[in-house]
Image (tube, rainbow, N blue to C red):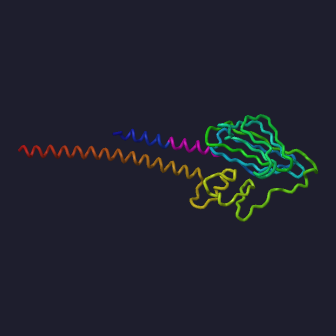
Amino acid sequence: MWKNLDLLKYSKNVVLLATVWLQCFVLLVRACGQYIELGSSSTSSISISNSYAPYSNCIWVVEADSGYRVELNISSFVGQELSGSCVDYITVRDGSDSADEVLGKTCTTLTNSIVTSTARWMWVQFKSDGEITTSGLTAKLSTVYAGSVISNYSSPLESCKSFQYECDNRICLTRAYLCDGFEDCGCSDCDESACTGLPFSRTELLGMSIGIGSFLSIGIFVFSCLYERYRKLKAIRIIGETSEWKVKFLR
């Protein structure tokens, strides 16, 4: 049976491991996906670090000023292919919807690659599987003047219907997908954060789970130690009573 010092060391190791694991998880959960408005001379950045979360789904909907196109300059991107299929990849569409024409989709390595929309809108998605992470994505968004050729184009961004939920990146999502445990909007759990029930974020719930798990683990260990001590004391008592009975019997 372990001594009290061993129990203390075990407890400290469990708590330390849980704390480190939680901190690593928090680092993985990074903001991704949003609605971006670009002025005539403004720029914006898209960045997915190499610590992106498993099953990431990040969608950016970009809108430029009237008379301007959207230009995406990909400084660096490393995707991942598995068995002939892209598992970590980016998709760029010519518009504001997942059904618009694809300007590019790849999981290969890119450097200094430029994609330009034909009108004022662009849809960019980064998606990954749950396996190995790559170095991620670094890109810059800017505008390119196109003149009156596209200045009269009406916005394809429509108001969401009553049965739909408007995500922070202006994507309309069927309400049936809300609070299903998956990132459907593509903007950092924006379809999961307004869920009813326990008023805790995923990270907080994870921390609580780790804390409860650690407490139960320590509790089980302490119980097993106490039970083992109880068994030994009981055995010693039985042996003592047996010896006393034998002495009386011999007398």
Q: How far from the left and from the top, in percent, is residue 20?
A: 54, 41
- The quarter of the picture where the C terminus appears is top left
Q: Is residue 21 magenta?
A: yes
Q: Residue furthest front?
A: 84
Q: Is residue 142 magenta?
A: no
* In front of the other: 145 or 153: 153
* In front of the other: 104 or 160: 104
Q: Residue furthest left?
A: 251
Q: Residue furthest right?
A: 148
Q: How far from the left and from the top, in percent, is residue 229?
A: 30, 44
Q: How many numbered discs?
A: 0
Q: Residue at x 73, y 36 (%)?
A: 108
Secondary structure, magenta segment, majority class? helix
The image quadrant that residue 46 belongs to is top right
* In this rendering, position of residue 57 left or right of residue 18: right
- The quarter of the picture where the N terminus appears is top left
Q: How far from the left and from the top, in percent, is residue 205?
A: 55, 52
Q: How far from the left and from the top, in percent, is residue 11?
A: 44, 43
The image quadrant that residue 190 belongs to is bottom right
The magenta stretch spans which residues? 16-29
Q: Residue at x 72, y 65 (%)?
A: 162
Q: Residue furthest bottom?
A: 162
